[in-house]
Amino acid sequence: MDNAVLTRLKNAGLLSEQVPDMGFVSTGSYALNKVISGDYTKGIPVGMITQFHGEASTAKTVFATHILKEAQAKGYYTMLVDSENAYNPEFAKHLGIDPKKLIYAAPETLEDCFQVIEDTISAIRETDPDTPIVVAYDSIAVSPSKAEYEAENYDGNNMQGAVRAKSTGACLRKINPLMRKHKVALVIINQIRNKVGVMYGSPDTMAAGGKSLEYYLGVNLKCISNKTSDLLRDEHKSVTGIKGTVRNTKNKVSVPFRECEFELMYNEGLNPYAGVLRQIEADGLVKRNGAWYTVEGTGKKFQSKEFEGLLLDPESEGFGPIHKFFGI
């Protein structure tokens, strides 16, 4: 095409510069970072919307908290939109959040939640045009639309699907362009509810947003945990946490439809190394034969219960290729 034509189109505002990679923020789980970005140290993309969805008590909020912690460690602005009014400053601080560096808001309606996010982005960009912003919205599932909230018969459970989906779509159309323009990573927490009367196929449905929400997602992650068989217990049989799976159902930065394991210890947060052994086996760093694993290149043999200790010890004999891979 003639360069003069391209110049005229650009001067008319019809063309844009290609947006470079804006970076990533770790999820606090090496295995999940790998599933999302193809790299153990990256994670969720800046410039896109990422959703964690699942049933109650499947570590969705903890993942969001760890992402905020990792963002603070990189010097990014962090914000929590707490529509559930469930934020616990002490627990967040225990997980590594600096409350003084966390912008906090608890709006009442869906539209107000997105508006306060937009206003905060604008306020930050008035004085700082470059530092990335990471926002966690927990959760979109409990935020009523203004139409629901102002209705005379609204009781907190009157979730009119079509009204909410329309409101969600309108809000996302407005805020989605701001993600790349202003280097923002938005993490949305959503819940799964069951459709009534479904006889065939999956009865799962999103509690909020419907299909309109899915269209705007860069990454969509489903958290799965069985509240009976996936409990973690100590030597006294007391419950200390849960384990489960995160399944990547949509991905614009890497290969979709991958999954990994996670472990959440209630007093400690996420185990960053859960699921890593299975991932490095898939990457060819180790080979498995029954209960034993062998490190490629050194012949070092170990069992799964030994893996984390060997990984964290830089002096572990025969673990050099794995240490090098993780930068240890």
Image (cartoon, helix red, strand yellow):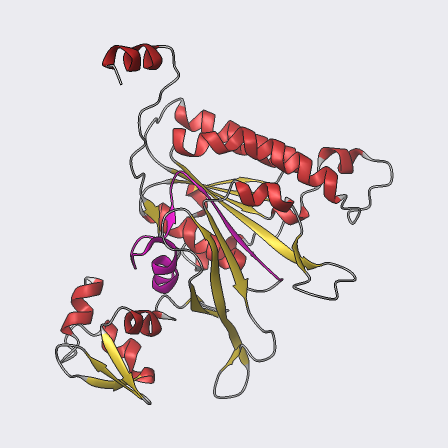
- In this rendering, the answer to whether 200 lies above or below 79 is below
In what quadrant of the picture does the C terminus appear? bottom left
The answer to if 51 sits in the magenta stretch is: yes
Camera-side residue: 262 or 309?
Answer: 262
Image coordinates for residue 62, horizontal then vertical, percent: 49, 58
Q: Quadrant of residue 74?
A: top left
Give the residue at x 24% y 72%. Answer: 284
Camera-side residue: 328 or 251?
Answer: 251
User: Visible in this render: residue 161?
Assistant: yes
Residue 143 shown left or right of residue 60 in the figure? right
Residue with the most extreme right position:
153
Camera-side residue: 279 or 5?
Answer: 5
- In this rendering, the answer to whether 2 lies above or below 67 is above
Give the residue at x 70% y 40%. Answer: 164
The answer to if 172 sits in the magenta stretch is: no
Image coordinates for residue 231, horizontal then vertical, percent: 54, 77
Image coordinates for residue 251, horizontal then vertical, percent: 43, 50
Magenta span of residues: 29-55
Give the residue at x 27% y 78%. Answer: 309
Give the residue at x 62% y 31%. Answer: 170
- How many numbered marks, from 0 up? 0
In what quadrant of the picture does the N terminus appear? top left
Residue 159 shown left or right of residue 249 in the figure? right
Q: Quadrant of residue 213?
A: top right
Image coordinates for residue 271, horizontal then vertical, percent: 40, 68
User: Visible in this render: residue 97?
Assistant: no
